[in-house]
């Protein structure tokens, strides 16, 4: 049997050079937004303690119960992180970031892993950028998170998206709401899907998230969380909406928005795009005032969000073309003969130390082959160097955009290319 060549695992992708340019452009936009908002980068390990994720994200969520890439090694339990919030909450306590005073405003960019069924916009290794604001209970922190996300969407040129907003209440409001849901669904239990029947006893709010047709009709008539918020939650929610209105940010209140992670309290939000297909969530987030304490830290209110970077790039495909044009080298050196080649290797070093992007054909073959490579790389200039040029000191610099040529000495070449770079 013929040996088959190795391939990436299902749902895991290489990012090839032509795509990398788009990723870099997106990362640059995220970093620039972080600078404007004065958020600081945090980088946490890709492998976390499985118990951290189980406790943080919630044992009953799909992420923890079905989608973790986890393994044990000796006494230690490792999981490829499925999201970033639990890790940031852990780091906050581990490094006593609360003692630095004030509110911590953090952001991260990196790969996440969930063993989901791959489809367009859903991978097993995907990338998120996210922000977490730790140490503020103020509605303005929720709004800062939302405006950070929208600001990135706007900068990548996305215009068609919807922001859905909800409050999932605090422990007290949720208790009242869960009781109401149980009272509503129990007589209808037989009509619910099997999964939802299980959820009815374990975590009835998860039924609201069901994609099953038989559940959806019942969910449509179910009680709404917004009718069960206590005064604190309801005041907070009203203030978030008032601030968004003041900023003229359009949103719809969706009382069925529960999100797939268990740590939320009060505000929850999600942004979706009609350009994505079935997996239409560009990003989501919310407040998680109890998480840090739940993970063994001091009680610290917090809020944040994360966006799927693959999905941002899919939704922004048209813009990508504009965003990320293939980078062009400023100059491609065309040495003819061994002496010129030795000269060119040193010349490359000098050009690059001037900050000029410079390439050359490594095999130093015919002029025609070298010109062909310079064309393929879309170089702005070529510098043709043979024995004659080296003896006379007059080098031929060719402008590839208008085919004009000039004879210049080496200092003049460097000056001209520095200006063109
Ligand atoms: P999440 O809603 O689970 O939230 O994920 C955020 C975003 O990551 C989704 O809206 C989606 O764009 C992207 N995403 C999730 N799973 C996949 C996948 N399998 N393939 C491609 N993209 C995916 C969180 O992760 C929370 N940590 C957000 C947060 C931060 N909440 C508070 N702070």
Image: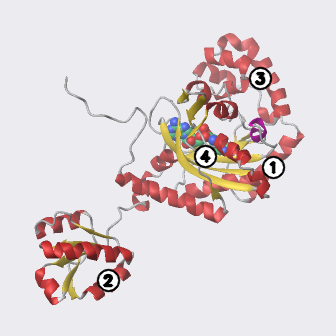
Which residue is denoted by mark 2 in the rendering?
Answer: 414
User: Quadrant of the rendered structure where residue 417 is?
Assistant: bottom left
Rate crowding at label 2 as few (under 14), some (14 to 19) or many (20 or more) other CA atoms within 10 Å.
Answer: some
Q: CA distance from mark 1 to mark 2?
A: 56 Å
Q: CA distance from mark 4 to mark 3?
A: 29 Å
Which residue is denoted by mark 1 in the rendering?
Answer: 137
Circle nearer the N terminus (2, 4)? 4
Specify the segment rendered in magenta: 291-295
- The label nearer to you, 3 versus 1, is 1
Residue 251 versus residue 23: which sits nearer the camera? 23
Would you say the beta carbon of the disc 4 residue lies within 8 angstroms of ligand 1? yes
Residue 114 versus residue 238: which sits nearer the camera? 114
From the top left corner, tell me how far across and down residue 127 is, in percent.
Answer: 51, 45
Tell me the quadrant of the picture where the C terminus can be found.
bottom left
Which residue is denoted by mark 3 in the rendering?
Answer: 181
In the displayed structure, 111 sits above or below 321; it is: above
Which residue is denoted by mark 4 in the rendering?
Answer: 306
Would you say the beta carbon of the disc 2 residue lies within 8 angstroms of ligand 1? no
- Residue 7's disc is none
Regarding mark 3 in the picture, which secondary structure is present there? helix
Would you say the beta carbon of the disc 3 residue lies within 8 angstroms of ligand 1? no
Q: Is residue 201 magenta?
A: no
Decide if residue 281 is in sight here: no
From the top left corner, tell me how far across and down residue 251 is, in percent.
Answer: 68, 48
């Amino acid at each position: 049997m013929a040996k088959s060549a190795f391939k990436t695992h299902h749902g895991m992708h290489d990012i090839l050079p032509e795509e990398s340019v788009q990723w870099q452009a997106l990362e640059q936009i995220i970093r620039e937004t972080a600078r404007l908002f004065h958020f600081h980068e945090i980088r946490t390990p890709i492998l976390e303690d499985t118990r951290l994720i189980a406790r943080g994200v919630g044992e009953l969520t799909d992420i923890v119960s079905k989608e973790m890439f986890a393994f044990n090694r000796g006494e230690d339990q490792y999981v490829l992180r499925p999201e970033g919030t639990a890790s940031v909450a852990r780091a906050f306590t581990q490094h006593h970031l609360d003692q630095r005073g004030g509110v911590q405003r953090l952001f991260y960019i990196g790969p996440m892993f969930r063993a989901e069924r791959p489809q367009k916009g859903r991978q097993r290794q995907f990338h998120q950028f996210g922000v977490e604001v730790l140490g503020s209970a103020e509605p303005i922190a929720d709004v800062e998170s939302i405006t950070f996300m929208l600001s990135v969407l706007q900068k990548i040129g996305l215009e068609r998206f919807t922001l859905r907003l909800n409050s999932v209440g605090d422990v007290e409001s949720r208790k009242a709401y869960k009781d109401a849901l149980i009272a509503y669904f129990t007589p209808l239990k037989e009509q619910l899907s099997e999964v939802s029947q299980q959820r009815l006893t374990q975590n009835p709010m998860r039924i609201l998230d069901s994609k099953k047709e038989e559940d959806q009709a019942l969910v449509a008539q179910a009680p709404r969380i917004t009718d069960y918020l206590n005064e604190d939650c309801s005041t907070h929610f009203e203030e978030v909406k008032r601030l968004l209105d003041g900023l003229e940010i359009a949103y719809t209140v969706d009382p069925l928005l529960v999100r797939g992670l268990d740590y939320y309290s009060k505000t929850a939000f999600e942004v979706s795009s009609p350009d994505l297909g079935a997996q239409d969530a560009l990003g989501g987030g919310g407040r998680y005032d109890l998480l840090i304490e739940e993970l063994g830290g001091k009680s610290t209110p917090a809020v944040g969000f994360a966006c799927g970077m693959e999905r941002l790039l899919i939704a922004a495909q048209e813009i990508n073309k504009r965003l990320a044009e293939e980078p062009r080298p400023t100059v491609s050196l065309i040495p003819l003969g061994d002496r010129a080649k030795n000269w060119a290797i040193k010349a490359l070093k000098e050009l690059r130390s001037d900050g000029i992007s410079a390439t050359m054909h490594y095999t130093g073959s015919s002029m025609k082959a070298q010109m062909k490579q310079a064309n393929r790389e879309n170089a702005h200039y070529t510098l043709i160097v043979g024995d004659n040029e080296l003896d006379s000191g007059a080098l031929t610099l060719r402008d590839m955009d208008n085919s004009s040529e000039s004879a210049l000495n080496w200092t003049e070449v460097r000056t001209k290319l520095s200006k063109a770079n």
